[in-house]
Amino acid sequence: MDVIFTRRSVRRYKKQVVEQEKIEKLLKAGMQAPSAANQQPWEFIVVQKQENLDKLAGISAYSKMVADAPLAIVLVGNEDRMRLQLHWEQDMAAATQNILLEAAHLGLGAVWLGVAPIKERMDYISELYGLKKRLKPFCVISIGYPEEGQENKFVDRYDPDRVHNETY
């Protein structure tokens, strides 16, 4: 599981298309995530056309890199599948992490761009894709082949001072 230790947030990408086989592997990884009561509330919007990536980059001041990525995946929670309404964000976060780890495993770089629970960002995505009220935007993942110097690499973040045994 070296990929857990080497995955980084990558925000600059080569002008290289992500192959369809890799996109499918990313989506399969997302769908393998654990889910409360196995509700699997996720839906995925795959975005590759430049005009759509440009629009998607308008989510916030922190999402400009989407316009320079060859691929973005929008994760959306479907309320029709949410038997446990309070856990959908945890399910979606697990799916997001799986996609990020698979991206690193495939030699891709990716960054998680938060959407939920910020109403303005959720509304922006909903309007952009004409989402029905029962579809809740969760996040956007910007994906591509990392530019030189942006590769996934190990950075030691372990801090024993944050570990508490038996009590805080």
Image (cartoon, grey):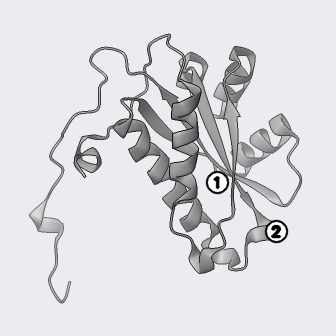
Tell me, yes or no, if residue 2 can be seen here.
Answer: yes
Measured from the top left, where is residue 38 in percent x and y?
61, 75
Q: Which residue is mark 1?
A: 116
> In the image, residue 86 lies at what x, y percent?
65, 76
Is residue 62 in sight in this rendering? no
Q: Nearer the viewer, mark 2 or mark 1?
A: 2
Pick the residue in front: 163 or 44.
44
Amino acid tagged 1: Ala
Q: Is residue 28 above or below residue 162?
A: above
Q: Position of residue 121 (x, y in %)?
A: 70, 43
Q: Which of the 4 image quadrants contains residue 113?
A: top right
Q: What amino acid is found at the position of numbered circle 2 in the picture?
A: Asp
Identified at 69% across, 15% down, the residue is 50
Q: Are marks 2 and 1 in contact (CB under 8 Å)?
A: no
The secondary element bearing badge 1 is classed as loop
Left or right: 4, with 42 as reference point: left
Residue 85, quarter of the rendered image: bottom right
Residue at 51 percent of width and 33 percent of height: 22
Please give the residue where the numbered disc 2 appears in the rendered image: 80
Helix, strand or loop at disc 2? helix
Marks 2 and 1 sit apart, C-alpha to C-alpha, by 18 Å
Which residue is situated farthest in the front direction here? 21
Residue depicted at x 42% and y 43%: 102
Quadrant for the C terminus in the image: bottom left
Q: Does residue 107 sit above or below 28 in this rendering?
A: above
